[in-house]
Image: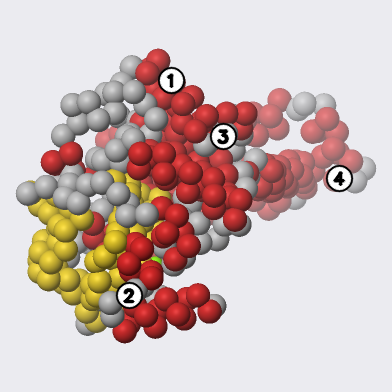
Amino acid sequence: MFDGKGNGRVQAQSLPLRLRDLRFERGGQRLLDIPALSIAPGEPTLIMGPNGAGKSVLLRLLHGLEAPTSGQVLAGDAPLDEATRRRQAMVFQRPVILRRSVRANLAFALHGRRMSRAEKADRIDALLRMARLSDRAAQSGRSLSGGEQQRLALVRALATEPDVLFLDEPTASLDPGATQAIETLIREASATGTKIVMVTHDPGQARRLGGEVLFLNKGHLVEQTAVEPFLDTPATDAARRFLRGDLLV
Amino acid sequence: MSALSVSLRLILSGDPDLWEIILLSLRVSLFAVLIAALIGMPLGAALAVGRFPGRQVLLVLLNALMGLPPVVVGLVVYLMLSNAGPLGVLQLLYTPTAMIIAQVLLVTPIIAALTRQAVETLNEEYADQLRSLGLSRLGSVPTLLWDGRFALMTALLAGFGRAIAEVGAVIIVGGNINHVTRVMTTTIALETSKGNLSLALALGLILILIALSVNAAVALLGTTAQRTAYV
Ligand SMILES: Nc1ncnc2c1ncn2[C@@H]1O[C@H](COP(=O)(O)OP(=O)(O)O)[C@@H](O)[C@H]1O
Ligand SMILES: [Mg+2]
């Protein structure tokens, strides 16, 4: 994507992402209970599981949008802090597009970063090309189609060259064409060294992106397995039922 | 000759007394809205995103202030500014400044409340994304204000509408002194009671025109926001 990526980048600070004795409760309900989890650098990590399993909550905890009730979120060997958070980025299921032009949406992500004006302009131009939105740069971001908005949200998240990119069902409301465009961008980001941590309900998507699957059920981490074996020969009953049910829908 | 035709002639001939009154009205109310915006917008935004002790109390207070009868606000400002009052030394009673103060007190709660509402709604949508991009709660206020700009302009217009049409407070603290503190509403009240209906009617027409313009501006803002896919 951008040259210089990987050079001098200290991945150790952001990865592995680990949970230790993590519990998250809200309204008297234990929503997440994960004694140990480690997310290593490399291939994408895909989070799967039934609705309400705690997938979104897990992403929010890993990104520091929520604080655990007890236990720890660790990045590298240190607790997740503000500096590490700034080396992460997130794309939400429904893209949040600021009420400004496409270009200004991208510039917003670079605000306050130590770059010259020219560097920023170059970076924004590159991001626009990546998202295939170069000819829409001056247009209001919110006048774009759903797929275009999600592409914009995705390259905006990549603007700061994050070490880790979280995605929460980014293609859930998109048609196949738009989904393919998003998956291409995700693969490119992954290939250039950004760790992808993504919630998906689509086994086909999991297979296309590769990597490992975290299977969550009722707030528990049930399996952490490579994608192919998880989909072909799930080890647990819960995963088997989930995959059968999901494919039938 | 009917009062209406005389009043129309007053307006169309550019009667200097009439224009003096109109311009003072505009000056007082625009200035009051400007000050109210400088106080009310940051206050409203802080109430929308902040989680500080006393926030709930402030919210209740704000709503109560919004419903304050203008006459009471006028009375309070009068007591503050009168010779015996704590700010009596400033000798502000019966000046345009006193009227501005009264209108600021009336308009600030409106602007603050509308700002809070607009920013809170926007923040529900933006909060996670802005946090993800590294902004703190307080750090996201400028973004929320800017992206809520259409709603905030509507709030300003609402404040101006209230200020320019208000009579109870400014008549108490301004005193309706000819060539000094006479504004449209107070003049209408006085001239009507004196039976001079043509001047009252002329000012009434202008006031209606201003109210209509404010409403038209609000509507225009709304359609512009829609058209530019701002919403
Ligand atoms: N802030 C919250 N307060 C209370 N309950 C919540 C909160 N966030 C999520 N939940 C609940 O936690 C469970 C897991 O939510 P979520 O992580 O969004 O599930 P999913 O796996 O579908 O993404 C759900 O039952 C949801 O209702
Ligand atoms: Mg979810």
The reply, left or right, for residue A81 in relation to residue B100 is left
Q: What secondary structure is found at the residue carrying circle 1?
A: helix
Q: What residue would you read off at disc 3?
A: A132
| Distance between mark 2 and mark 3 Cα atoms | 38 Å
Residue A242's x, y, as percent?
40, 79
**Kind of residue at badge 1:** Asp
In what quadrant does ligand 2 lie?
Answer: bottom left
Nearer to us of marks 4 and 1 is: 1
The chain holding disc 4 is B
Q: Which mark is residue A234?
A: 2
* Image-quadrant location for residue B145: top left
Residue drawn at the location 13% of the way across and 66% of the way down: A36
| Distance between mark 2 and mark 1 Cα atoms | 46 Å
Discs 2 and 3 lie in a common subunit: yes
Nearer to us of marks 4 and 3 is: 3
The reply, left or right, for residue A212 in relation to residue B70 is left
Residue drawn at the location 30% of the way across and 70% of the way down: A215
Q: What residue would you read off at disc 1?
A: A122
* Image-quadrant location for residue A121: top left
Residue A80's x, y, as percent?
15, 50
Q: What secondary structure is found at the residue carrying circle 2?
A: loop
Tell me how the rendering is colored: secondary structure
The reply, left or right, for residue A179 in relation to residue B17 is left
**Kind of residue at badge 3:** Arg
Q: What residue would you read off at disc 4?
A: B4
Residue B86's x, y, as percent?
24, 45
Q: Is residue A94 above or below residue A215?
A: above
Q: What secondary structure is found at the residue carrying circle 3?
A: loop
Q: Are marks 2 and 4 in contact (CB under 8 Å)?
A: no
